[in-house]
Image (cartoon, helix red, strand yellow):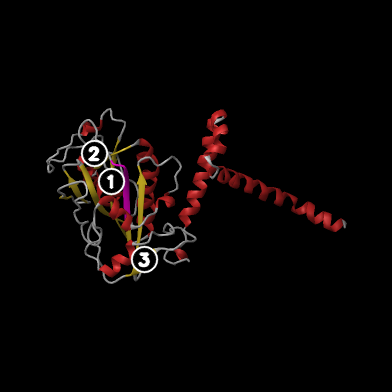
Amino acid sequence: MASKRGKMKHFRPVLLLAAGVAVYIGGPVGYYFLPWSVRRPIYKTAPKLDRALRLRGFKTVEGWDGLGLWGRDCRTALEGRSGGEHVYGGNPSQGLKLFDRVTVLKNESYIVGYSDSMQNPLWVAYRVFDVPSLDSGKRPSSFRIDQRTEAKVPSTAFRGSGYDRGHMAPNHAIATRYGVDGQRETFLMSNVVPQTPRINRYIWKDLEARVSRRYGRYFSEVWVVTGPVFSEPVDRLDSGVAIPSGYYKILVDESGDALRVLAFLVESDCPPYTRIKSRLVSVDELEESTGLDFFPRLSESVQAEIEVQPAGRLWPWLVPAIRYSVHP
């Protein structure tokens, strides 16, 4: 009996430590998933505590999602190499849902499908790849009119509107792959859409960082096509720039002998602390929302495999053994 008590006494610090870790991690995670009706009294009486617990729980869940330990990839057999310098599977085909003409603007570091009537890029395509350094250097201080467009949206078009000038080809991803000249290209107004600060500075920024700092670093090449989504009736800034109702991003990777895709839709009213994984959708859904046809140069059979179903997980990037595996 005494020996059993001695063993329990020996393991007690370990058990207490394990319990403490469980509470430290599990408490905020549990709080993160509480419905607003339960959280509301805490938020009203202790808003800083509410935000701190939500943020800690959110970061824990986001980190777990990022491991991609379960869920299926949206993938199919690779029929042939279809990736270009910036675009995978051909430029998105012009749609007629909300705009009448798309002008393709070619830059050294990315390509834009621009609508003068909407005064927005409808799609922007670029490619990321591994680089020795992720130092993007000094950020340019101002945006510039793109003289190739008819709209010639000025950098002051968003002033006083409450909207950020949201990059579609991101400053960091392009600067680290194409240098200063490429970085300057991202500050053309043809690469910018209205985004609320809540979107631009949080979930969209996190998604861009995941692509640039993780996927672009740990996989050989990742092609990206991204842009705004509009819903009727379309609201506009006082300057005439159309305001999106959401934003999409499609990632393509050739992993071994397979082609895989991630597609995201982030609504403009997306609440704070929204998990990136929860924004996964199918390419078909994005085509319905945007009126665009993505990957027009891929065969119908390949498109059917990668466009109908959404991915069930984010791409694993931390553990090499599971990066390309498929989990049921």
Earlier along the polypeptide chain: callout 1 or callout 2?
Answer: 1
Q: Give the range drawn in magenta.
A: 244-250
Q: Are marks 1 and 3 in contact (CB under 8 Å)?
A: no
Q: Can residue 129 be seen by looking at this rendering?
A: no
Q: Do the residues labelled 1 and 2 touch (CB within 8 Å)?
A: yes
Which residue is at 42% across, 49% downward?
276
Which secondary structure, mark 2?
Answer: loop
Asked if residue 231 is among those painted magenta in the image, a careful observer would answer: no
Earlier along the polypeptide chain: callout 2 or callout 3?
Answer: 3
Give the alpha-carbon distance from disc 1 to disc 2, as whole Å: 10 Å
Which residue is at 23% across, 41% downward?
187
In depth, the one of 56 and 321 nearer the eye is: 56
Q: Position of residue 295 (x, y in %)?
A: 25, 61
Question: Is 232 drawn above or below residue 80 in the view shown?
Answer: above
Q: Identify residue for label 1.
A: 228
Earlier along the polypeptide chain: callout 1 or callout 3?
Answer: 3
Q: Is the magenta stretch mostly helix, strand or loop?
A: strand
16 relative position to 303: left or right: right
Q: Residue 75 carries which label?
A: 3
Going by the numbered disc 3, the residue's amino acid type is Arg
Question: Is 137 drawn above or below residue 44 in the view shown?
Answer: below
Q: Identify residue for label 2.
A: 242
Which secondary structure, mark 1?
Answer: strand
Q: Do the residues labelled 2 and 3 touch (CB within 8 Å)?
A: no
Hey, which quadrant is residue 93 in on the image?
bottom left
**Mark 2 or mark 3, whichever is nearer to me:** 2
Asked if residue 247 is among those painted magenta in the image, a careful observer would answer: yes
Q: Where is residue 132 in the image (x, y as percent from the top left)?
A: 34, 54
Q: Position of residue 199 (x, y in %)?
A: 37, 40
182 relative position to 101: left or right: right
Q: Can residue 192 be seen by looking at this rendering?
A: yes
